[in-house]
Image (cartoon, helix red, strand yellow):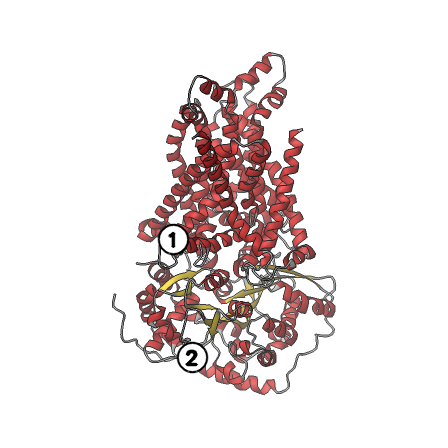
Amino acid sequence: MTPRRTHLAVPWLLSAPAAALLLALFAGPLLLLLRVSLYESSDGGTGFYRPGTWTLRAYGELLGEPFGRGTIAFTVALGAAVAALSVLIGYPLALFIHALPRRAKALAIGAVVLPKLANVFVVLYGVNLLLGHSGPVNRVLLAFGVTSEPLLLTHSLFGVVVAETYLVLPYAVLVLVPTLDRIDPALVAAARGLGAGPWTAFRRVTLPLSLPGVAVAGQLCLIWALGAFVGPLLVGGPEQATLAVRVQKNGLEYGDWPRAAATAVLSLLTVAVCVAVYAWPARAMRRAGGGP
Amino acid sequence: MKCPDASARADGPDRRSFLRAAGTAVGASILGGCSSPPPPSGTDFRGRTLTIFVYSGLDKLFQEHFVEPFEAGTGAKVVLDAGWWDSIGKLKASPKGQPAYDLVLTDATQGYPAIKSGMFRQIDFDRVPNHKALAPVALDNWVAKERYAVTFHESAMTLVWDRRQVGAEPSGWGDLLRGDFNRKLALYDSFYMSLYTFACMKVAADGKPGTAHAAVAGDLGGVLDFARCERDRVRLWWPTGTKMAQDLLQGAFAAGNAHSVAVLRTVKDKPEVVGFTTPDADRAFVQLMWVIPADTPNAELAEVAIDYLLSKDVQTAVAKRGAGTSHLEAAREAAQADPDWARTYPHTDEQFRAMRYYPYEAYFKDWERIKRTWEQEVLRKS
Amino acid sequence: MRRLTLHLTRGLGVLALVTLLAPLACAVWMSFAPGEVLEPPTSQWSLRWYREFFGTAKWTRAMATSAEVAGLSVLGSLGSGLALAVAVTRFHFRGRRAVAGAVLLPLFVPAVVLAMGLLPFVALAGLQGKAVALAAAHALVSLPAVYLVLRGALAQADPDLERAARGLGVGPVTAFRRVTLPLIGPSVIAGAVIAFILSANEFAFAVFLSSPRVRTLPAALWPEARDKETPLLAAASVVTALFTLLGMWIVARLLRR
């Protein structure tokens, strides 16, 4: 992709609406957030923060104590795992959907998107039901003799990973299907015509050409998964609390606004760092696909 | 980790018991001639709009039993807004002089800090004559005494169990320490209820049931240690009442604590599964309150509204919904109508005298320490 | 052998889709429960909750508000996201990297926190409780995702095609509209779908920026969801899902023309 130098105002004009949205609706709250995180927490029961104070104590506690560091580590690990799972499961599913005839393809995409159109509480309630103590998963496990007693799949790490992957996967599919559609079918046909089997044609034509799309899907899923909130809240136990859950607990249940704000700022930094780290493999994937 | 054997037993606050006795005496003398007072006459609030924040699920109830007679009686318009914890945040963000609400229903954990930070104004109790129809003990706390809130009780801490799994039915909180409940308990993840549950278990184990309040106030360290010791008995920590009900019906736990309102609702649909009791010793109730934002222009109207909300009609509807009511007459009638309600909530004078909220004041004295221990050592394996 | 693998892959694909739908199927099933407890009905089925949903103004008005807000927010995020994606992929300008990074930031902050932080500003601007304010907030939240998707698509679309059209004497906007836009069409639709989903489901901003008059469905349902999930919630979800699907189908049909 070669850059084009024309009217220098054009790119700025094009960027203006997005920039305006960011400045008007994001910069203000972000600065407010930063300021609140630097207040001193009041002793519980006397208000939300001590006005007029400045302190780094909230950050110190979060980063200095194993509890805070553990939450950050868990959030990152969960985010990476869920993103990876979403792409790993989403890619074959996208391949399957991409190969369907037009009407079935529309239905399949509808089926993938449909769960996201329902209220997330209801959907996770369904997940809880399926993974529940007397739900179908446990019944199957008992029937096949894998366990003698029903397993506690909710309130557990397993449940959280399943729930979050369930919530993030549709985005992976929504990004990957158009990616696969964009690959010129003539290229695959040519490979087959030259004698390549279906697996080889996929491996040497489709897969490399789809890697830029995979990079985007991975980035999107990573960002969503790092913000995991409802899944850990409703399907996980206290050991599966992510940064977002801590923000909610501190801010709204305990009224400790400085700590909640500091957790939110750290959450932002964590995601930023993860995205920056992700840029390496992402660039490699884009290059492999013949991108910039 | 070894659990502490002896717990220092502290006496309950003497000032409180004196005030309660005094209050009861006064209340009893007033009660003699008290019924639902007529709507205030001569007050015309035509053209005004009162925006009230209530907890979800209550808006339908208030719409039916409160909004119509109130609008008819005062000429004002009512806008009900239902939510959960968004009220405080919205109020804090409202511009001065234009608070998001004119009247707010909140609880002690949210209300006390907000009141202390000056968000709410004092209430003229003379304009809320129905407060005298409440059990005096309901108003026996600092926010009501300093006139910042009209407080009353709602949900009780209830012992719930799965009748399919449990043979010998538990009768007190000490029973949760039974061997057959080990690793099969389900407790609320919020400490305002579950720390108190641990306190009840501890005093029962020490052979002194009925002293849980004193234990939290006087031996907080002992209670926290006990919680830390016994947390392994808990199989799961429920985050919402619905999750608790779902897990109970699925058989995921044998026994635990719960909000009485959720239990009474679930037991109606599944009596063969849900067993429950609200043990007499160490009963504790959620404290709710009506508060008026400091800079509302409709303070008088809000006070009239509180009065209506405390009327017998509204309180009877509240009781029918499965919650407790501090309105003496409404409570008496609700108890006669529903035996399950009667064995959960206070309705006789003696029961009201003994009614206690969760030990909020003790919690707020040592908030940081409790929160830290709870989050890091009780909820999680340390 | 090939036929076997074909059937196997097809079977697995269908199984995956069915698994994706299973929790939602549970929700649909629960919406027919006759009692108040959120449990799948086995002996008695009832349309009671659907009747209550459609019969109560609170819910139907909330649904209409949700649609309005979601529609506005899709326009906002598509418009600004597409423009930004074009700027970043087709032009080289100072601040390009900064803007491309900054656009992702809103995703990194928990929605509840952003909502609480936004509230005082919205109140100051006098927009508290207006649908436009909520739509703008939703556009902000979906902008990063929409931008990412569109940028990926534009990066893949060969700029030489557009250049060829320019060489033939077509103006820049027309070249974009008739050459590039159809090429990235599916991604635009994907972006619109993502933006719509985000807005229709979003409850943090909806709760804080709402007023009794302007309330989206998630904001109206949120209080019910926390401690008192009745099958009404399930019924509402089913209705929302179906309506949205219908809307998407209509849009897809229109675009095919």
Q: Quadrant of residue B214?
A: bottom left
| Viewer-side residue, B293 vs A15 | A15
Identify the subunit bearing mark 2: B
Disc 1 sits on a residue from what chain?
A
Q: In this view, does B218 lie to the left or right of B16?
A: left
Residue at x-position 56% and y-position 56%: C30
State the separation of the CA atoms marked 2 and 1.
47 Å
Query: Farthest residue in the top direction?
Result: C168
Q: Residue at x 39, y 50 (%)?
A: A158
* Secondary element at image label 2: loop
Residue at position x 52%, y 63% from top? B118
Q: Which residue has dot 1 on it?
A: A144
Residue C241 as seen in the image, left or right of residue B363:
right
Relative depth, front residue between B78 and A187: A187
x%, y% of residue C4? Answer: 45, 33
Check disc 2 and give the amino acid type.
Answer: Ala
Query: Which residue is denoted by mark 2 in the rendering?
Result: B281
Q: Is residue A34 above or below residue B359?
A: above
| Callout 1 crowding tier (Cα within 10 Å): few <14, some 14–19, many ≥20 | few
Tally the numbered discs: 2
The image quadrant that residue C51 belongs to is bottom right
Q: Quadrant of the C terminus of chain B?
A: bottom left
